[in-house]
Every structure is written in structure tokens, then in C-alpha cells.
Amino acid sequence: MVKYCGFMSLVAALILVGCASSSTSGIELTVSRGDATGAYKGTYTGTISLTSTADVIALGSATDQRTESISVEVTRDGLAFLSVRDVTITGVVDNTGNWGLQASIDDLRSLLSATNISRLDDAGCSFGAKAARIQGVITPPDMTAEVSGTLKCKRAEVTVATLTTAGTLAASR
């Protein structure tokens, strides 16, 4: 009986570990917040274009290509607020006009298809994990950025889904 209980405890532990999920991206910004960014202050309007590919084990791969209108509010104290539909993402601007932010699946939801959102959810991806980096430069009156990132969703340390993003942002004030 003791051996049986010990064995069942081991099986239960393995099942729990097998169901555990995590998401990793390794997405880091190379821009730090500045304290003298008044030259870049203002509201910039434009578009963001994003190509995203969700590759989910057993479901296959699907690619979305979307373009959305955006606005970016840049403050004189080194903050940038990117608005896409009803979502605002906070980023930073340095004293030389470099700017950037990190975006999650939740932040980019309007740029992903309902099918890919559902697939990533089924795979256990964390929608709050950073999935993309948007980073570029402000040269008044224009600002540009590149969008890039890879989010890996894992179960029991095995990658079960990957979201890869690439694109551009262009705006003017």
C-alpha cells in the first residue's frame, strides 16, 4: 500500500508538472528614459504594420498581416504613449531621440486574428508576456520604428507555440 501511494504521488506530481505552462521572449529594450526630451514632445499620428506568425504544435502555422492607425504622445520627461485602438502602451524616449517599448499579446490584440489569439490561448501562452519590441528614432517632425519579437510558449519545458512578429511604425506630428 505504501509503495502504491508513493507511486500515485509521483504520477500526480508529473501530471501537474506536465500541465504547467510558461512564456518567454528575451525581448529587451536598448533605450533608457531621458530627462531632457522636450525637442521630441508632441503627438505623432501614423500607422503600424505588423506581420505575425503563430506556430502551434498539432495546429500548424498561420500568418496575419495587419495595418492599424496609431498615435504616439511623447512627453518632455522621456515617456512615450503608443495608442492602438483602445490600448495604450507606455515606452521611453532618450535624450537623443531614440525611443522604444515592449508590447504583449494583449497590447497587440487588434493586430492579430481571432484564430491566432485562440490558438495561442489553447497553447497556454501568457497574454501579458512581452511578445514584441517596438524601437526606433524620432527626428522631428517624424518618428519611425521597427517591430520585432519572438514569444515561446512552453509546457513542461517543451515549446508548444511560437509567436513571431515583424513590422514597422511610421508617424508624424
Image: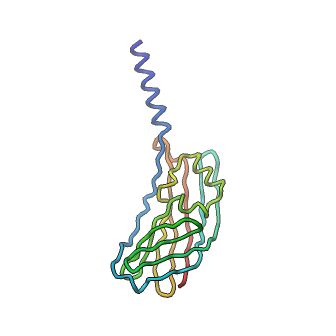
Write the residue at 50% across / 60% down.
104
User: Residue 149 placed where, x, y %?
Assistant: 50, 63
Q: How is the image coloured?
A: rainbow
Write the residue at 49% across / 67% down.
89
Q: Taking 8 as reference, is 97 above or below it?
A: below
Write the residue at 63% across / 54% down.
116
Q: Taking 104 as reference, is 16 above or below it?
A: above
| Horizontal arrangement in the rendering, residue 116 relative to residue 145 (left or right) | right
Write the residue at 51% across / 79% down.
144
User: Residue 153 placed where, x, y %?
Assistant: 51, 50
| Horizontal arrangement in the rendering, residue 64 relative to residue 146 (left or right) | right
User: Residue 127 placed where, x, y %?
Assistant: 52, 54
In-front residue for pair 132/85: 85
Dividing the image into 4 quarters, which one contains the N terminus? top left
User: Residue 55 placed where, x, y %?
Assistant: 59, 53
In-front residue for pair 71/95: 71
| Horizontal arrangement in the rendering, residue 66 relative to residue 101 (left or right) | right
Q: Taking 109 as reference, is 75 above or below it?
A: below
